[in-house]
Image (spheres, grey):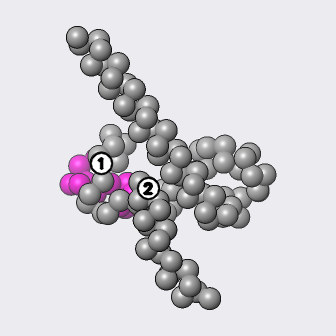
């Protein structure tokens, strides 16, 4: 059964490409670069642990009623992360547009 999950890995990466970018090819968030680590981002260093930490800072458990992050449905978590990423990108675009408007 385990081979089935790993066989579908490329499909998951394709469907959720916005939250799975190749190492070294990430858009540099200000929070990613830390203390002169020469291009190593927090995500590169901590991997899924950082994702669990970030999820713990959200109200994702209140949506599902689950008691622990590790009990959440994997596809639900991917959808949540994808939505969160897109909302953050939209906010960045809105701020950039407001900044451009102020300059003009």
- The question of residue 76 being in magenta is answered with no
The secondary structure that most of the magenta stretch takes on is loop
Is label 2 in a helix, a strand or a loop? loop
- The question of residue 35 being in magenta is answered with yes
Give me the residue at 26% from left, 60% from top: 24
Q: Which residue is mark 2?
A: 19
Give me the residue at 39% from left, 26% from top: 94
How much space separates mark 2 and mark 1, taking CA atoms? 11 Å
Where does residue 77 sit, x and y in percent of width and height?
A: 60, 57
Q: Quarter of the image holding residue 1?
A: bottom right
Q: Which residues are magenta?
A: 34-47
Q: Residues within 10 Å of mark 1 (few under 14, many from 20)?
A: few
Q: Nearer the viewer, residue 28 or 3?
A: 3
Compare marks 2 and 1 and give the one earlier in the sequence: 2
Q: Residues within 10 Å of mark 2 (few under 14, many from 20)?
A: some
Figure disc tally: 2
Where does residue 96 sit, x and y in percent of width and height?
A: 32, 26
Q: Which residue is mark 1?
A: 27
Give me the residue at 49% from left, 68% from top: 12
Q: Is residue 52 rendered to the left or right of residue 104?
A: right
Q: Is residue 48 rendered to the left or right of residue 70?
A: left
């Amino acid at each position: 059964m385990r081979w089935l999950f790993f066989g579908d890995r490329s499909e998951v990466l394709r469907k959720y490409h916005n939250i799975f970018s190749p190492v070294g090819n990430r858009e540099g968030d200000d929070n990613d670069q830390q203390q002169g680590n020469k291009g190593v981002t927090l995500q590169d260093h901590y991997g899924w642990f950082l994702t669990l930490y970030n999820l713990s800072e959200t109200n994702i458990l209140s949506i599902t009623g689950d008691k622990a992050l590790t009990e959440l449905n994997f596809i639900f978590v991917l959808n949540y992360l994808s939505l969160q990423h897109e909302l953050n990108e939209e906010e960045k675009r809105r701020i950039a547009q407001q900044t451009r408007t102020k300059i003009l």
